[in-house]
Image (spheres, rainbow, N blue to C red):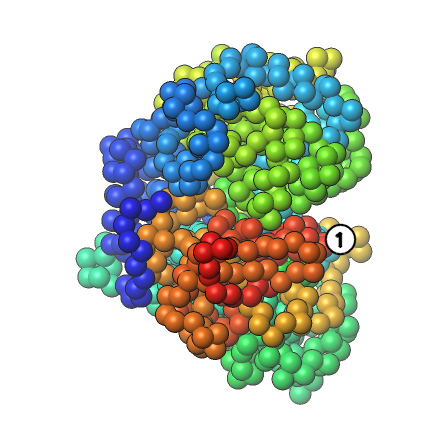
Amino acid sequence: MPDRKPSYRTYTAPAGGWGAAAATAKVLMQESVLAKGSRALLSMNQPGGFKCPSCAFPDPECRKTLEFCENGAKALAHEATRFRVTRELFERYTVSELAEQSDYWLEKQGRLTEPMRYDPAIDRYVPIGWDDAFATIGRHLRALGSPHQAEFYTSGRTPNEAAFLYAIFVREFGTNNFPDCSNMCHEPTSRGLPPSIGVGKGTVVMEDFDHAEAIFVIGQNTGTNSPRMMTNLVEARKRGVPIVAVNPMPERALIKFTEPQDVIQMATFGSTEIASEFVHISIGGDIALLKGMMKVIFERDAAGEDVIDRNFVNRHTVGIEAVREDAFAQDWADICRVSGLDEEQIRRCAEIYIRSNATMICYGMGLTQHQEGSRLLQQVANLLFLRGNFGKPGAGIAPIRGHSNVQGDRTVGIDERPDRDYLDRVQAVFGFDPPREKGHHTLEAVEAMLNGTAKVFIGMGGNFVRAVPDTERSYAAMRKLDLTVAISTKLNRGHVIHGREALILPVISRSERITTEAGEQFVTIEDSMAKVTASCGILEPASPACMAEVEIVCRMASATLPDSKTDWEALAHDYGLIRDRIAQVYPGIYSGFSERIGDPAGFQLDVPPRRLVWPTPNGKANFLLFNGLEANRPVDDPAMLRLATVRSHDQFNTTIYSYSDRYRGVYNDRMVVFMNEDDRKERGLARQARIALETISDDGIRRRVAGLTVIDYPMPRGAIAGYYPELNPLLPLEYFDEISGTPAAKSIPVRALPDSDETA
């Protein structure tokens, strides 16, 4: 916990700028890697260097000397830290004592240095050799009554080579149980977009920012979650491109931003105003906004204006008439009530859209994490269809994914619902018949643990137990397992909330060298715009006992599958052989992989809608109807507030860099609730009152988080926000998007109640 008193004050400076430069220097010093970290930063996102271990935003073709952002520097500093977790730490603390520490404290202990196993007799982790660790994994997996009793988790930082082999190993073992970090964030992209456009990816590339005539950024805090994108937005604004920011929270970077790499702007303390239109939408009101904009377009079309791209619609789409009728059926009063906007602003947004001949719509988890997240994205596609915003420069749909290579993992096989063509190619290339039945996504995996059908959990990176909803139930689920395996760089909550047996396997990080019997190896990463580039670490591994992810996968496979026809040992040493296998399994997009990756700039994967080709069953882009205006099921409770869980600026996923969030004016505290001042007064709460939040649900389970300080913030009426993962206990496992299984973390129905000693 922080050792200074919490304070709260409005941040008025531009985002980025000297604040970002100071924060970068500070974190390098805090982790005692000022010289080492600075050298590594010069190689991050550069040809021949390594890819940022933080967000998935692409690197520009015209590279700058310093191609990194503040949060990328923080991720690197925490990865390259001089601090180490050795066996002495585990001798000093029992696991029960470690479980009492904060997530921040666990993270700050540093890099893991040797394999450890849990000894229940003394409640401590003790060293174990790599051979014995793999033998333990193989013994547990082979002893299962069914392969489906094991869950195989993947974090988005896993590179293509390791993820591809992980998928092959698990399918040869006999299951498609692949709970994945994408299940908790952008799965509506993967499941909701294919019925519309045929692919579960975005359709834009970096060059499209240079040609866009309008950019909509919806439900995405760019300055914190993908700061390198701010350069593109700054350049677009300087060209006069309108940028429409749609968010329940005014985010500082989308209001005013200073580029740290812009010498003149830094020297003159200048900045760029980003959003030309800020749309202060209610939580879950996005469908209403989109339908309102479509209603305006259809009204003007009916009046004889040339506002619909009829050539595109007639040649490439089906279903417009049903969407048109639905738009006309919507009442403006309902649209305004649900969206929280006035009709005038919705018409203004529609006018910006209509005037543009090339529009990009970028979005984040503010759209995906709702009960109707998948159908919400289909409405985004509908809007883009009306003006023909696919298959031309500057136009398209752009999911801004969070974790580096989370998209690549899905591309190379991490998917609980694999398609038949992929499975047939796996059978042809690897010589075994992979399972054909659907596996578990994240929430189904937790349910399987709770009901006792899951026995083993293997986590390839990440902090699964802290990331999933319904914290107390999820903790209980993990503790029921026979074995948990954490393949990790640093200590986290998943190591202290574990099964009856537990292993911690320390892994080489993205920024570190991988050297095998075949020489130095590199891995590959797919960014959020489907470009694949090489990543080659430059630092020495944190410990000689750390092992590369690829070798860990291969040795788990060898220990589990003694009769496998796959030469796992050869693949563990020569990553070129893995890329050759990827090319065989994916002969279209990855043909010539080993040769193409030799280009320092990487290569672009084919995304058919960019060519106006639609891989849907009917070969068309489909307007898809959604009956209603709300992205979440209504709740009949006059006291209800809609809670969105969010990251702070000093955080990446579950990793907490500090207890401050300078852009939102919060210092030394994370137990806060951002609330509209009128909502606070209506509830009789004083400024900075201490409250508890309690989930509104009908399942008989009481979910409550107390000790929260109310912060006045310009939220829409009825909307509040607080930090993830501290407020995960309020999100029921059953509260999710039915199409994708993604938890509805951006719209949890809660009540604000007085805090008390009894509930704190």
Q: Is residue 390 left or right of residue 218?
A: right
Residue extending furthest bottom? 303
**Residue 207, position as x, y percentages in the image:** 48, 54
**Residue 710, position as x, y percentages in the image:** 41, 64
15, above or below 517, in the image:
below
Q: Badge 1: few (under 14), some or many (20 or more) residues near its Cα, within 10 Å?
A: some
458, above or below 194, in the image:
above
Q: Is residue 43 left or right of residue 148?
A: left
Q: Is residue 365 visible?
A: no
Residue extending furthest left? 267
364, above or below 550, in the image:
below
How many labels sit on residues?
1
Q: Residue at x 58, y 45 (%)?
A: 472
From the image, tell me which residue sits under label 1.
616
Using the image as rendered, state which of residue 597 and residue 504 is in the foreground.
Answer: 504
Residue extending furthest front? 758
Q: Quadrant of the N terminus?
A: top left
337, above or below 569, in the image:
below
For label 1, the SS is: loop
Three-letter code, disc 1: Thr
Q: Residue at x 72, y 19 (%)?
A: 142
Residue 392's image quarter?
Answer: bottom right
**Residue 173, position as x, y percentages in the image:** 73, 24
Using the image as rendered, state which of residue 289 and residue 729 is in the foreground.
Answer: 729
Q: Residue at x 46, y 61 (%)?
A: 755
**Residue 609, position as x, y percentages in the image:** 65, 54
Q: Is residue 500 visible?
A: yes
Using the image as rendered, state which of residue 484 and residue 544 is in the foreground.
Answer: 484
Q: Residue at x 45, y 37 (%)?
A: 100
Residue 739's image quarter?
Answer: bottom right
Q: Is residue 587 left or right of residue 575?
A: right
